Image (cartoon, rainbow, N blue to C red):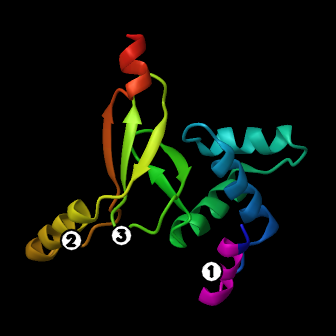
Amino acid sequence: MAETEAQCRARGVRLTPIRRRVLEVLLGAAKPLGAYDLADALVSQGRKMAPITVYRALDFLIEQGLAHRLASRNAYIASTGGHATPAFLICEACGEATEIACPDVAETVRRVLTAQGYQPLSRALEITGRCPHCQDVH
């Protein structure tokens, strides 16, 4: 968390206590969480927070590359790296999402977008399927 705060200071932005707490909950979550799930998790830790406050904190975290929104789940996950085009493996059975580093895929996506003159709003790739654990169970 100290490194994250240092990165924010270097960018001239502030990791407020609320933003920090939302990020900590995301980092500690076993799977992606919706905004209301985050609000509930914060209440259980003694901090009542309005959903709009959670959404504002999430917007900040996404802008800073500290979290990602998984559109297919309408849920959020902490970023594990500063990938330009992160890819997520999302298990349909257990809901686990894993961010993977794919420099070749990221570069290919960048080239295709440039060639098409396309301005994406989001660059996260989401791949759904079954994780190794759930494949073994079913």
- Left or right of residue 64: residue 110: left
For image coordinates 63% across by 89% down, the residue present is: 10
Q: Which residues are magenta?
A: 3-13
For the residues bearing labels 2 and 3, Cβ distance under 8 angstroms: yes
Q: Amino acid at mark 2?
A: Arg
Residue 69 image point, x, y percent: 47, 53
Task: Point out which mark residue 126 bears.
Answer: none
Q: Secondary structure at mark 1?
A: helix
Q: Amino acid at mark 3?
A: Ala
- Give whichever of 106, 135 is nearer the camera: 135
The residue that mark 3 highlights is 84
In magenta segment, residue 19: no
- Give whichever of 32, 106 is nearer the camera: 106
Task: Point out which mark residue 110 bears.
Answer: 2
Query: Could you give the CA–CA distance between mark 2 and mark 1, rounded to whole angstroms?
Result: 25 Å
Q: Secondary structure at mark 3?
A: loop
- Total numbered badges shown on the rendered structure: 3
Q: Quadrant of residue 101?
A: bottom left
